[in-house]
Amino acid sequence: DADVTQTPRNRITKTGKRIMLECSQTKGHDRMYWYRQDPGLGLQLIYYSFDVKDINKGEISDGYSVSRQAQAKFSLSLESAIPNQTALYFCATSETGRAGEQYFGPGTRLTVT
Amino acid sequence: GDSVTQMEGPVTLSEEAFLTINCTYTATGYPSLFWYVQYPGEGLQLLLKATKADDKGSNKGFEATYRKETTSFHLEKGSVQVSDSAVYFCALGPDSNYQLIWGAGTKLIIKP
């Protein structure tokens, strides 16, 4: 079984709808991350969490919110989706003290029409 | 601020060719350097890393050496296979917020 899972894998939604993307991990890591990937732009960090009570904004947090429900679960919400949020979204985890060694989920492809 | 620059892709090679993907960086302090690989339809996975100057990271036939004098961490492989077709990301860090700084990625296409 995969160590980092994301649901759904694909989602098509309309402008203005609320969307939640979910991430679960079995690696026992404290740190979790949400990234967005657009073609040719690499990865952009949306939010990151060091533990359940420590959540931080990344470089592109506007229009997004997150919830760390447990050590193993980290959800990303788009409160009112817009077309330029169409992208591939990745969740990742890492151990405390090893932030460079991240483990990624398979990604969620989100399309906002 | 710190940054990573990778060569633009796609890079197209024939099977068994020699591969180099260039990565240069600017950084204050002494960051670690990483190469990640993203196979089609999958998430990224760590390929190799180097934590200090002159270190060589290696994995699956790929190598990269942390060169402080040229601020580079070029990825090399002596003989590529079709299965190496993927997007390769160079990264440095962690920064003061314990985050990685990512390059834009280089798409590699290997033709049989």
Image (tube, rainbow, N blue to C red):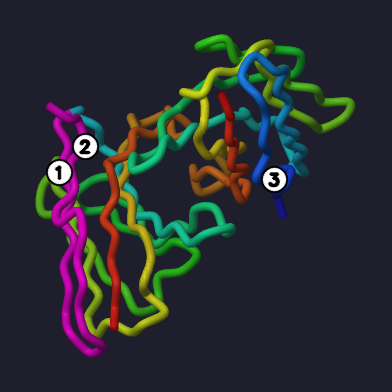
Give the crowd class for mark 2: few <14, some 14-19, many >=20 residues within 10 Å: many
Horizontal side, residue A30 vs residue A34: left or right: left
Give x and y (percent) for residue A38.
48, 62
Task: Give whichever of discs 1 and 2 has the lower sequence position.
Answer: 2
Q: Which residues are magenta?
A: A1-26
Give x and y (percent) for residue A62.
40, 77
Chain of the residue under the numbered disc 3 shown in the image = B
Tell me the tag on residue B4.
Answer: 3
Q: Residue at label 1?
A: A24
Marks 1,2: beta carbons within 8 A: yes
Give x and y (percent) for residue A48.
35, 53
Marks 2,3: beta carbons within 8 A: no
Chain of the residue under the numbered disc 1 shown in the image = A
Horizontal side, residue A28 vs residue B66: left or right: left
Give, as a three-letter code, the residue at label 3: Val
Give the crowd class for mark 1: few <14, some 14-19, many >=20 residues within 10 Å: many
Tell me the tag on residue A4.
Answer: 2
Horizontal side, residue A49 vs residue B108: left or right: left
Between residues B60 and A22, which one lies in front from this camera angle?
B60
Between residues B30 and B59, which one lies in front from this camera angle?
B59
Where does the C terminus of chain B fall, quadrant-wise? top right
* Cα separation between marks 2 and 3: 27 Å
What residue appears at the point 52 percent right and 12 percent down from the top-left corner?
B59
What residue appears at the point 16 percent right and 80 percent down from the top-left corner?
A18
In the picture shown, does residue A14 fall above or below A60? Answer: below
Give, as a three-letter code, the residue at label 2: Val
* Marks 3, 1 in one chain: no
